[in-house]
Image (cartoon, rainbow, N blue to C red):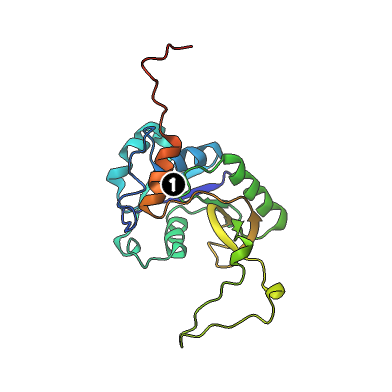
């Protein structure tokens, strides 16, 4: 049984409007990059989107290997949880409870397929939902949540500050029986470029922009 690869791609984005569908300097998009990785995982790839019309190019390229799931409008708002989006896909595309599922967020455009497959292998080994996480730099370990009354809890000693991690978004791996949960076994990876702001998007463009050939320099 092949894994189900789920790519959530809504059009609403305040930081970078339509970021999942914006063309990059090399002709790709965040969405098409995520789909390409999903295809290399040898699974059944599904895009959950509220903008199927913006998925036409990538759907045409991959043909029947890719399925587009029009997301219900009530699951397309800013307050919609990933849990609800994934549950909707699992309800639509039914299969055995043991089927492996992988969620790939388009906002991690430079992920390598090996990182996804390694996370999937880790999930198989530990038998628990597993997600890629990156260590928070040590200087931030003492960060604390601001309580509702505006106070912070001071740690007793700096040495007691615990190591922290952030979800990198490269991959969330689980079986249907678990579903998209809130408790994840960590698979630790190096930090990934996650596109959240316009500055992130511009940095990505600079990294992948094709080099311009100087007309005065002969080709090798």
Q: Which residue does the numbered mark 1 point to in the structure image?
A: 46
- Quarter of the picture containing the N terminus is top right
Position of residue 148 measured from the top left corner of the image (x, y, whole percent): 46, 85
Looking at the image, residue 51 sits to the left or right of residue 168; the answer is left
Position of residue 192 measured from the top left corner of the image (x, y, whole percent): 54, 49
Position of residue 100 measured from the top left corner of the image (x, y, whole percent): 59, 51
- Nearer the observer, 187 or 136: 136
Position of residue 11 measured from the top left corner of the image (x, y, whole percent): 31, 52
- Nearer the observer, 13 or 63: 13
Q: Is residue 40 visible?
A: yes
Q: Secondary structure at mark 1?
A: strand
Looking at the image, residue 31 sits to the left or right of residue 118; the answer is left
The mark tally for this picture is 1
Q: Give the residue at x 57% y 40%.
A: 113
In the image, residue 37 above or below residue 142 = above
* Crowding at mark 1 (Cα within 10 Å: few <14, some 14-19, many 20+): many
In the image, residue 169 above or below residue 32 = below
Q: Is residue 32 visible?
A: no
Please identify the quarter of the rendering in which residue 206 is found. top left
């Amino acid at each position: 049984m092949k894994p189900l690869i789920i790519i959530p791609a809504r059009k609403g984005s305040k930081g970078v409007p339509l970021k999942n569908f914006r063309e990059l300097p090399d002709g790709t998009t965040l969405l098409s990059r995520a789909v390409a990785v999903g295809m290399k995982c040898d699974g059944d790839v599904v895009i959950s989107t509220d903008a199927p019309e913006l998925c036409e190019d990538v759907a045409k390229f991959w043909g029947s290997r890719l399925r587009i799931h029009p997301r219900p409008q009530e699951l397309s708002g800013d307050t919609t949880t990933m849990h609800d989006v994934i549950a909707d896909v699992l309800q639509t595309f039914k299969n055995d409870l043991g089927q492996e599922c992988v969620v790939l967020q388009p906002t991690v455009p430079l992920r390598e397929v090996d990182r996804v497959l390694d996370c999937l292998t880790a999930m198989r080994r530990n038998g628990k939902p597993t997600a890629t996480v990156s260590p928070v730099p040590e200087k931030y370990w003492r960060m604390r949540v601001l309580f509702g009354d505006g106070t912070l809890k001071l740690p007793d000693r700096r040495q007691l500050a615990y190591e922290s991690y952030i979800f990198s978004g490269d991959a969330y791996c689980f079986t249907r029986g678990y579903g998209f949960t809130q408790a994840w076994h960590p698979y630790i990876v190096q930090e990934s470029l996650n596109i959240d702001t316009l500055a992130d998007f511009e940095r990505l463009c600079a990294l992948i922009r094709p080099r311009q050939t100087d007309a005065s320099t002969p080709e090798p």
